Amino acid sequence: MMVIFIMHLMERLYRPLLLLVFFTNHLFFLVGQSMIPKYDYNWILDSYGTPCLVIKFGNNTIAYDSLNMDYGFTNACISDIEGNLIAYTNACQIKNSAFKLMENGDQINPGQAHRENCPADRYPAGEQGAIFIPNPGDSMRYYLIHASIAIQDFPILITWVDAISYSIVDLKYNNGLGKVILKNNPIITDSSICAEMAVVKNINNKDFWILSKVAYENAYYRMLLNSNGISVIGKQNNLGDTSSIKDFPLGVCIFSPNGEKFIRYSVYLDNISLFDFDRSTGLLSNYRSIPVIDSMMLDGGACFSPSGRFLYVGTYWDLYQYDLESNDIKASEVHIAHWDGFRYQNIFSHMFGRMQLGPDCKIYINCRNSMKFLHVINKPDEKGLACDFRQNQLELPQTHGGFLPSFPNYRLGVAPVCDPNLAVSVYEIPIYRYLSVYPNPASDEVSLNAEDQNIKSVQIIDLLGQLVYHQKTNPTPSIKLKLGTFNPGTYIAICTLEDSSILRSKLIVN
């Protein structure tokens, strides 16, 4: 009886303690949820001339918003800590959450490349040519780190990255819509630098390291962003990666979610350069080379699983998985899938291009071609085919092409890298009218229609930014163009309206 009495006494004393622990943990969970950094909860998707898409993660949905801005080669975006979109850029200009030009947000990366490419709303710096980072010392300010391009016309046409610069967005202006208070401030002025920038948090989980590959050298620049600003810490040479000397600067550089590993995937040499990374010093070490089966294409992408154990590499035609905990990483290679042959409208093949880990713990894969879907790795931390890769799983309300935005793990050290409870139900929120092009593709004649607006002039440019057609007209909502003099290919139709606004759309001539 005494034993039973003691047990009941302990239960009565223990139950309030359990309730206290439960409510304390629940309170910490709620507070923690509100403090989870959601800087990557909005993704801008490139669309080659048609209105862009924004993927919104959170609230148990992913929503798609149509934006009237083109991202032919470079795009970056940033949300606030609560997941509200605040700024986005195509490396030509910075726009705000109202989807309008931010004050002083024009003339990003000025120069010849800007003049020749930005009229078509695109800047050819590459997938990792721009990235937003929250200011460690001011929660209302955000850095845009961006690469600028130089062009040599004679004796042959050559382009290269001539600098990495920064601009600063401050949300204290214009009732939260922000203002660019500094822009185009150079960090590195070196014509050998690449637009391959990878970002990871410092060991203090507040500041940020930025690494950038040096072209045709076995070297990386490392920069540090802290509350005092951004500075170049040094250039690390002789890392063992001698293959990079003959490489082409079209690679992809990424950190593992925990920041302990760094890889560069060379789409030119079909090779993975794997390093260990010291988040306290910013130094790379322990170089390993992992050959990838040649795809014969200068395209593809790479992405770590949320735990960092598995690395996925897309070689345009094929998708592979590598176990980085294996003693023989190359031997751990698993062929996940080959392109299934699907072509949107029987024209645009949906290969495997750039990749990005979503805040929902899934990896999304796009393609340089115009595609109506995204491929999805649903369980990237599962080994082999258990990763549940599905081609063309996530349908978009319109076509998408080019690059996905590049995000670091903003939650490193303060929250889980992702939340698998985020759902993927979708709906479309049209924001902007757009230019209707019909038929598209076209061969003899095409109609450009601006709905209820009047067009006063039309420009047609090719994908090199060259003007191939220009016509002024009496204001009219619809214009027909004869295409007999156009070479087959892809063009951008730019219509200026009576109110001086501009509509753009892709035009494909067969």
Image (cartoon, helix red, strand yellow):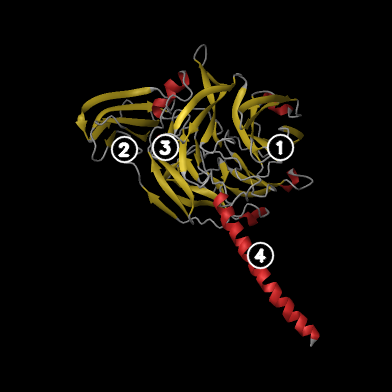
- Residue contact at pointers 2 and 3, CB within 8 angstroms: no
Quadrant of residue 67 within the rendered picture: top left
- Helix, strand or loop status at disc 3: loop
Q: Residues within 10 Å of mark 1 (few under 14, many from 20)?
A: many
Q: Which residue is mark 3?
A: 177
Residue 89 placement (x, y as % from top left): 46, 33
Please name the residue that numbered disc 2 is placed on.
435
Give the spatial CA distance, label 1 vs label 3.
34 Å
Cα–Cα span, label 4 and label 1: 35 Å
Q: Residue at x 41, y 32 (%)?
A: 102
Q: Which residue is mark 4?
A: 21
Furthest residue to the top?
A: 155
The image position of residue 184, as x and y in percent, is 51, 23
Mark found first going from the N terminus, 2 or 4: 4
The disc, 4 or 1, on the residue closer to the chain's N-terminal end is 4
Who comes first in sequence, dot 1 or dot 2? 1
Quickly name the residue at label 1. 279
Which residue is drawn at the image coordinates 29% and 28% (left, top)?
A: 458
Q: Amino acid at mark 1?
A: Arg
Q: Residue furthest bottom?
A: 1
Q: Separation of disc 2 and disc 4 at Cα?
A: 58 Å
Image check: 477 left or right of 14? Answer: left
